[in-house]
Each structure stands twice: as structure tokens, then as C-alpha cells.
Image (spheres, rainbow, N blue to C red):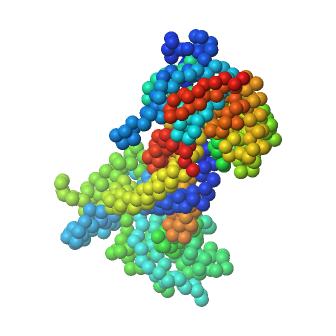
Amino acid sequence: MNFSETLKLAFSAIWAHKLRSFLTLLGMIIGVTAFMVVLSLLQGFNAYVDEKIAGIGSNSFTVRRFSFDDFKDTDTIAAAQRRNKELTFDERDFIRDHAQLIDKMGAKSGNVSREVKREGESLRDVQISGAEPIIAEIDKLDIAQGRFFSMPENDNAVRVAYVGMDVANKLFPKGDALGQAITISGIPYRIIGIQTAKGTVFGQPQDNFVTLPIKTFGAAFGGLTRQRAPYFVITAKNDKVFNDSVEEVRMLMRIKRKLAFGEKDSFGILTPDAITALRDSILGPIFIVIIAVPTIALLVGAIVIMNIMLVSVTERTKEIGIRKSLGARQADILKQFLMESATLSAMGGTIGLIIAELLGIIITKFVFQTRIPIWSALFAIAISGGVGILAGIFPAWKAARLDPIEALRAD
Amino acid sequence: MEEENGNGKSPESPSASRGEALISMRTIWKTYQMGTEELHALRDVSFEVKRNEYLAIIGPSGSGKSTLMNLIGCLDSPSKGEYWINGNLVSEMSDDELARIRNKEIGFVFQTFNLLARATALHNVELPLIYAGMRAGPRHDQAQAALASVELGDRVTHRPNELSGGQRQRVAIARALVNNPSILLADEPTGALDSKTSVEIMHLFEKLHSDGNTIILVTHEPDIAARAHRVITIRDGLIEKDERLK
């Protein structure tokens, strides 16, 4: 009996007991759905970290006052706070003048949270920060309307603002925010650019910000110090020299700060690798646990399938006897029941996958981006089919071993 | 192994060399172990069946006739003795080889029809061909032809519960014949049918016999057995009588 015959037979047997098949499948559906949703959340989270936080692919790294290591415990934090000075524009210029491997370099300031007003409207808790004009190129900003700042605007501390979509829409419900004035802490700014909406991540709105030229920002909010202190964003000339570029910047910073050989860095350099490594070290163990839970659901699904296949073999003893009397070999019967449980299970897997996909769309829309990579979809179907085969082995073996005379005598 | 020639099994192959006996049972014993006691269902049974014979095996219940039928049908193996069918030494075969012999050499007709309830008449008739590994195209044609030969050519898509008892038995006969087996082995084929339908089915057997088929009928009804050309009577696991009627 060939494969397609066996498959057809499996489908007709499953179809003959629709309700029972469906109930049997529920375990597998729930298992695979849970598995895929968890996996897609993890994948989505990883992709988020890669793209948005670590900036993988953007070929950039940042120089900051503190490194990850400085946050190990309270003692190291305290020590770093004493030792690590805020970054200065002198240092920026020193790096820019001496580095051979960097492509672009720009400074950004830390954020402050302020109320933004406009005639009758106002918006609280808007993240205000400063940036150099070149940041638009480094961060590859997605500008919906208008433009980012120009060099002269920054050099002259002109009061212009580049705002997120939420700020534009909420303060100017009728549209036409571009060119209009907003007021922050009593100082007016003219909107020259609006960024394309990014939605929310973990419930955090991404479009609720105002970026000012860094000089304007420094002048208006009490200097580029403390939480407003600048940090540098740097891109390497190309991927090949990326690591060398990081080392070069590190050396230049050490030279500028006159650090002795063997002395610890008094600043931090954050590379995409460092960020993903941190993520993996935190999430690695959690990964294993959250994968384990849906795996148990899959196991339960497999037990349900095995149980129902045993029932099915008992019910169809007569059919097995008839088939054997007509020339079915043990292998034919074995294949028939294995195919049936594998098909049943793979159907559950496929349905589970579809549900997970739909849930993923909903989660992506309202909570957080998810991602079901194609390999994991194929993996889920293969796993569920494989589980079906494993669950079917014992019942199918029982069926194949039936004595045809006994089987024919069954009711 | 699938295509192995049965004649190669042994140089002593009786039918192939002599061109006579289709079935040859030689000193067949079937013994069941009931606790410490041995129960002999068949004791030293020997007989031959030639091609195109119409044989009835008759005997009361408990006589060993069902055991004999299971042996003839290759559903079971004897405890002792040799069983040859169409040049194959069946008594020494493994389960899977027996399955192949059942598929190629035996066409079963059962008292309770034993059709697959969920399958159409056509699919039921196709089953032996499926296990023979035949492709779908020729298989449909051959099954269709078999159904037509029992005058059910217009009932191919019906399921067993949509057919009368006589029609069901004719589907079963079509299924038994579809593979052109060496023997048609019928176990009480009229046992579940009313007398009018029984007569129809017996007429069909006679027609099949005159078409050249070898038929073995197992029954406990003397008037059904009387239609055969030869009757073997079994009692207490022994052949009591072996008489030729026609």
C-alpha cells in the first residue's frame, strides 16, 4: 500500500469520527498554540532587541558614561559614579579628529520629561532630548513630514523641534502641525519635522517625544549635565572594521582621559553584541522554562492521541481482520494506524499553528511584536506529526499483531 | 520476495509438477493447548482439490470444519503436516507470506459479508487490489468489472447499509473474485440470507463454477452442500466421508 493510499485512508478514518477527532486534537492544538505563541513572543522580543535597542544592522555603537559592568552591584555603581566623568564635546572632537575607522559620529543628550503645550492643548510626560543634526543619518530616522535640524540651526541654538507622531496628532488634532509653534517650559519652538509613527512597545508609546538641536536643548534645560549629559553614537566605516573601530574609539577615549595601562575604562562602550549577550544571559534560563511548559502540553496531547488510537484499534478489530483476510500484511496495518495518528496529530499542529499565527497578529497589534519564523512553523508541524507517530506506535503495533481469525470474530 | 515464484519453494511441489491438485493437504494436524490438555481440532487430515472443483465441506459445529476452513484460507497454520496451494508450501510460511497468499490465491466469502461499512461497494472490491499494490487506474477498472460480473455495475457508489443482504453478499463475492484467486472459499455464504436470496447466491456460485472457478463451500446445511459436486464430511477432526455427487 503506497503513501497516498495510506494518507487517504487516514483522512477518511479521521473524517468518519469528526467530533472525536476534533476533541482528540484539542490537546495537540492547545499544545502547539501555546508553544508557538511563546516562541513567537521570544522571537519578536529578540528581533526587537536586535533592531531597536542593539541596532544590529545599523552598524553603530555608543560611548556612554557607564558600561553594563558598572551596574553589577551597588558598590560598582557607586565606584563608577565617582570615577566616570560625564562625556564632553572635547572628547567628541578628539575622537572625531583622530579616529580613522569611524564613518559618522554624533552626540545625543539624555531625556527629560516635560509638559508640552500649544494654545488650548497640552500633553504631559513628553520625552524631550537633544541631538546633533547628523543623528538623522546615523539613526536612519524615518521622517514623515518636514526635515531634521540643519547644522546652522544647531550651532545657533535655534528653537526648532522634531516631534513624534503622537505629539503632532494630540496637540494638533486637525493636522497641519508642521511649522506650528509648541511651548515647553514656557519657551516656544517651531515644529520642522514629524517622525513616522512607530506604535507602542511593551505598552510604552514610541511616538511621544520631542527632539531639539542639542545646543538648543542644553541652553533651555540647564546645561548638558547630569541626566542630560551627552553620549556619542558612532558608526564604523564598514562591518569588517566594526570591532577595530570600537577598539580605536576605546583607545582614543583612554588617551584623552589619560588612563594608565591596566586601569579600568572610565566610560562605557555599548556594542550590539554586548546588548544581545546581556539579553541572552538574562533570558537564557527563562527561555528554557517557558519552552518547557508548552512542551508538557504537547506531551499531554500525545497521551490523548495514544489513548484514542488504542480505542480506535479496539473498535476496528473487525476491520483489521477483514483487511488481513484480504491480504494486508502487518506492515500495511501498522502503516495505516501510524499514518492515522500522525495525520491526526499534524492536523492538530497545523490548526494550532494557524491559531498561534492569528493570536500573533492580535498580540502584535495591541501589545508587542511577535514573529513566527518559517523554520519554527515547519518545526511545529514536524514535531506534532512526530509526536503522533510516537503516540501511534504502540496502538498500531497492537493492531498489526492481531490474529486475523480472532479479529474476524470480533463484533 | 513479492514476486517470488511459488514453484521455487520445493522440488516436490505437487500441483505444478503433476498439473493436477490445486490444493493438497497432507496429514494435517491442528492441536490446541487447553491448559494441560491437548485438544486435537484436526487429526491427520489429507485430501486434494483439483482445479475447477466445486467442493462442500460439511460437519456439525465443533467438528473441526471452521479450523479446516481457516487452514485452507491461510488464516492459520497447521501444527503438523504439509499444506500446498498452487505450488506454494503454505504450512511453513511466515505471517506476511501468508498474507500474500491470501491476497493472491484466496477469495473469501463470509457468512456476515464482512464488508467495510464506511466504504463504497467499489472501494470494498478494490481492497485486495490495493494490498496487491495495483495502481488506481487499472484498479478501478478491474473492481468495476468485478461488480458488473455480479450484476452490481450500477451500485458502485453505494455503501453496504444502502444495499440488501443479497447485494451485500454479491459485493463480497465480487471482492473475492477481483484478484482472480485460485480458490473461492465461502464460509456459510447463505447463513445470513433468506431462502429466496440464498437460492440466488447459490445460482451465482454455480455460474462461477461453470466459468472455471474452483469453489470450496463450508456449511452445516446439507441442502446447500448438496449443490456441490463433491462433499467432504468432517466429524471430530477426522474426514468421515469424501463423496463425489456429480
**Where residue B36 appears, x then y in whole percent?**
34, 40
**Visible in this render: residue A296?**
yes
**Where residue A353 appears, x then y in whole percent?**
54, 56
Instruction: Name the residue located 40 percent from the left edge and 43 percent from the top edge.
Output: A240
Left or right: B109 with respect to B80? right
**Where residue A330 appears, x then y in whole percent?**
50, 36
Identify which residue, A348 or B178, lies in the foreground: B178
Find residue A256 and report its image quarter: bottom left
Left or right: B17 with respect to B160? left
Instruction: Name the residue located 70 percent from the left edge and 32 percent from the top edge.
Output: B226
Identify which residue, A113 or B107, lies in the foreground: B107
Instruction: Name the residue located 48 percent from the left edge and 78 percent from the top edge.
Output: A126
Identify which residue, A226 or A80, lies in the foreground: A80
Q: Is residue A175 above or below residue A80?
A: below
Left or right: A67 with respect to B92? left
Identify which residue, B72 or A8, lies in the foreground: B72
Q: Is residue A103 above or below residue A200?
A: above
